[in-house]
């Protein structure tokens, strides 16, 4: 049974909670998206193959899968606020340590540390929405997802034209630079985040997902398609454009891919409540994503920016409305563990798809084939939606 907790926060506390949700959302992507703008330089410095680039880019989603259960456990033991602060500290430390990378192996290891911090935060966020804004789940989800999307835009928009010139072109220093805002967000959460639900009696007593529940697997499949499109696009668009002789388009394409998500987020801040549990937004997203992927591969040139923006818009819309599903479909005490199971399944699949994309490029030596698994993910998004609708979980 769904229902708001007995002690919902008053209006001022609700607005503070909204601000904290938005800031925490920023931290989920800020340091991850600091890599794509400098991935071509990293590839050249370490002489990486396309498969190695795919592996580096797949570490965050891989850790999202492996460590997501840790986030559910921390919520059950510490409460949302303390668990979020812990995750933020790990992200900041791991991202700063990446600046010490002297080899590909060190970069992989430090990326693992950073990704663990993000991974344990992921299942905390739907729970934070459920506790901090129980009467505004759609809005609370749209706000933290808006923060997530803004966190994706800042590094892709600012790294090449502003940050790198300030840091003498050092990609290592730029990775350290983007860890500083995460530390600031941790301090803000410590000072201002609601302290609701921190007593032992209020904490969820179960943290492992119910792997026998079909809902966990259906949500996992839905998010696998959404995440695979996004992470693989960020990994392969830069090196695809470089291979096509258009490195001048990399910054614009990455900015468009990530900035294109902002209009979707702003739109959903207004209409998120009306789209709760509706199936059609996911179907439209899948179709638009497939068209955009084809355009990115077949129409390299000025239109690349348009196709990247369309892909960002469509994928973000599905992500935002999808993140409302765990708090809407689950009992409050089951939100974190259901989210953890969903993220474990979805990111494991996204990693596999990223590796397959890189291998398809390396084996065939045809760069365009790296995008075939992304197109399959767009089709899979429609199929997963129909499965949820068949179970009456979507309308």
Image (cartoon, grey):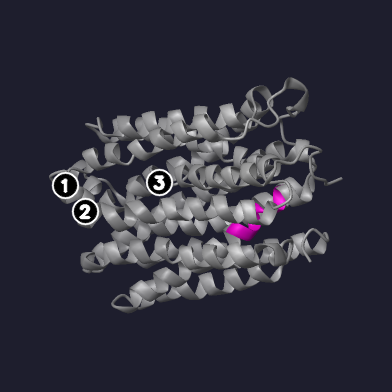
Q: Is residue 386 above or below residue 227?
A: below
Marks 1 and 2, Cα distance to the nearest angstrom?
A: 6 Å
Q: Are marks 2 and 3 in contact (CB under 8 Å)?
A: no
Q: How many residues crowd mark 2 within 10 Å: few (<14), some (14–19), many (20+)?
A: few
Mark 1 or mark 3, which is nearer the start of the sequence? 3
Q: Earlier in the sequence, mark 2 or mark 3?
A: 3
Number of the label disc, if any, that sits on residue 162: 2
Q: Is residue 256 visible?
A: yes
Q: Which mark is residue 166?
A: 1
x and y, in percent, of residue 339 in the image: 67, 42
In reply to whether residue 322 is colored magenta, the answer given is yes
Front residue of 151 and 101: 151
**Residue 232 in the figure: left or right of residue 226:** left
Q: Are marks 1 and 2 in contact (CB under 8 Å)?
A: yes
What range of the chain is rendered magenta? 320-326
Q: Position of residue 38 (x, y in %)?
A: 26, 50
Residue that label 3 marks: 30
Crowd tier of the residue under label 3, counting other residues whose Cα lies within 10 Å: few below 14, some 14–19, many 20 or above:
many
Label 2 element class: helix
Q: CA distance from mark 2 to mark 3?
A: 16 Å
Quarter holding the N terminus is top right
Query: In terms of secondary structure, where does tag 3 sit?
Result: loop
């Amino acid at each position: 049974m769904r229902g708001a907790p007995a002690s919902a926060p008053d209006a001022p506390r609700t607005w503070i909670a909204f601000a904290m949700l938005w800031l925490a959302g920023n931290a989920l992507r800020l340091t991850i998206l600091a890599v794509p703008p400098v991935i071509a330089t990293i590839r050249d410095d370490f002489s990486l193959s396309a498969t190695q680039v795919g592996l580096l880019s797949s570490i965050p989603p891989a850790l999202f899968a492996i460590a997501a259960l840790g986030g559910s456990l921390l919520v059950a033991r510490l409460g949302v606020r303390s668990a979020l602060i812990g995750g933020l500290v790990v992200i900041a430390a791991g991202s700063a340590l990446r600046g010490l990378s002297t080899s590909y192996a060190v970069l992989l290891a430090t990326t693992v540390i950073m990704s663990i911090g993000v991974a344990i935060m992921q299942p905390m966020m739907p729970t934070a929405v459920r506790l901090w804004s129980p009467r505004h789940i759609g809005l609370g989800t749209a706000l933290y997802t808006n923060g997530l999307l803004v966190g994706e835009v800042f590094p892709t928009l600012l790294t090449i034209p502003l940050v790198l010139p300030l840091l003498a072109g050092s990609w290592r220093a730029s990775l350290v630079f983007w860890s500083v805002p995460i530390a600031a967000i941790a301090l803000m959460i410590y000072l201002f985040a609601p302290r609701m639900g921190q007593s032992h009696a209020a904490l969820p007593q179960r943290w492992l997902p119910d792997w026998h529940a079909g809902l966990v697997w259906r949500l996992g499949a839905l998010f696998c398609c959404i995440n695979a499109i996004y992470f693989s696009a960020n990994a392969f668009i830069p090196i695809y454009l470089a291979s096509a002789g258009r490195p001048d388009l990399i910054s614009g394409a990455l900015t468009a891919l990530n900035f294109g998500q902002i209009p979707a987020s702003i739109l959903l801040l207004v209409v998120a409540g009306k789209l709760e549990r509706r199936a059609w937004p996911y179907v439209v997203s899948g179709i638009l994503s497939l068209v955009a992927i084809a355009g990115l591969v077949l129409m390299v040139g000025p239109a690349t920016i348009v196709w990247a923006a369309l892909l960002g818009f469509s994928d973000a819309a599905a992500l935002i409305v999808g993140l409302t599903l765990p708090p809407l479909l689950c009992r409050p005490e089951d939100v974190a563990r259901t989210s953890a199971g969903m993220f474990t399944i979805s990111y494991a699949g996204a990693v596999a798809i990223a590796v397959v994309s890189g291998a398809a490029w390396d084996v065939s030596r045809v760069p365009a084939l790296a995008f075939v698994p992304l197109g399959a993910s767009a089709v899979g998004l429609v199929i997963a939606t129909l499965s949820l609708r068949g179970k009456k979980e979507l309308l």
